[in-house]
Amino acid sequence: MVDAVAGVMGGMGMSSAGAASMSGADKDTFLKLLTAQLSNQDPLNPMDNTAFVAQLAQFSALEQAIETNTRLAMISVQQSGIANTAVASLVGREVTVKGSSVTLSGQGVGTQVGYTLDGDATSVKLTIRDEHGTVVRTMDQGAQKAGLQQVGWDGRDDGGNPLPKGNYSVTVEAKNESGSPVSVTQETTATLVSVSFDKGYPELHLSNGVTAAASDLIRVAGETIDTSTKTTGNGS
């Protein structure tokens, strides 16, 4: 819409910068400009009727463009508020977002590791690290078909020892029959504790310490949200 305003102002001999600065103008400003133009015209070469009518039409078009811009901005604010309210209503529910973290609730208690393969893979390897970045478990899954995969982890290390409660990161490495990497989208599931808006968009804070943008939301307690963006390589 700013381009439309700039076009009208350009027809009046004003620059795009001038049009942008006029975006907050009102009818009184238009009338003042017109009055000033009439007051300062050359008496020996006054504006003819055709030019005068053209100026009035340009002022009217600019006024309508600015009013439309204002209404669109109001609609955008309203829609943003509705979206924020909807996201905030999910607090306390179990959600799944894009991410590579999993949480163990206690010794000997396992969890699920979720990820989506963008294509068929002949080999899939999961590497699990603790909060210090130390590898505690590797899991070879062999060949897997494209799509969502859920792998159970018993919460133990490679030696069979139960691991303590805490957050762990998972790296999924998948390759196809030619040895090329298969794109992977990893996910993490936990309870949504809170939602913040200080960054200009809804940000989700999960009980396992994961923070993700609302756009990374995949599922809400069984509900699936369509998302077409995938990470490439060996996962996120």
Image (cartoon, rainbow, N blue to C red):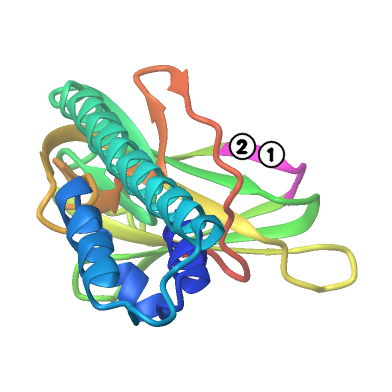
The residue located at (67%, 61%) in the rendering is 183
Q: Tell me if I can see residue 24 in this picture.
A: no
Is residue 16 in sight in this rendering? yes
Residue 57 x %, y %: 47, 49
Q: Give residue 176's mark.
A: none
Three-letter residue code for mark 2:
Leu
Q: Determine whether, in the image, residue 123 is placed left or right of residue 43.
A: right
Which residue extends farthest right? 178
Disc on res. 148: 2
Helix, strand, or loop for circle 2? strand
Query: What residue appears at the point 13 percent right and 23 percent down from the top-left corner?
Result: 92
Q: What is the x, y in percent for residue 38?
A: 28, 67
Name the foreground residue: 80 vs 191: 80
What residue is rendered at 18% in x and 33% in y?
192
Residues at discs 1 and 2 in contact (Cβ within 8 Å): yes
Q: Quadrant of residue 80?
A: top left
Residue 226 shown left or right of residue 17 in the figure: right
Using a 10 Å C-alpha cutoff, classify the residue at mark 2 as few (fewer than 14 neighbours), some (14 to 19) or many (20 or more). some
**Magenta residue check for 146:** yes
Q: Main secondary structure of the magenta part?
A: strand
Where residue 77 sits: x, y (%)? 23, 38
Q: Secondary structure at mark 1?
A: strand
- Rendered position, 145 above or below 41: above
Residue on which disc 1 sits:
147
Marks 1 and 2, Cα distance to the nearest angstrom?
4 Å
Q: Amino acid at mark 1?
A: Gly
Q: Is residue 215 above or below residue 148?
A: below
Instruction: Write down the region rendered in magenta.
Output: 143-149
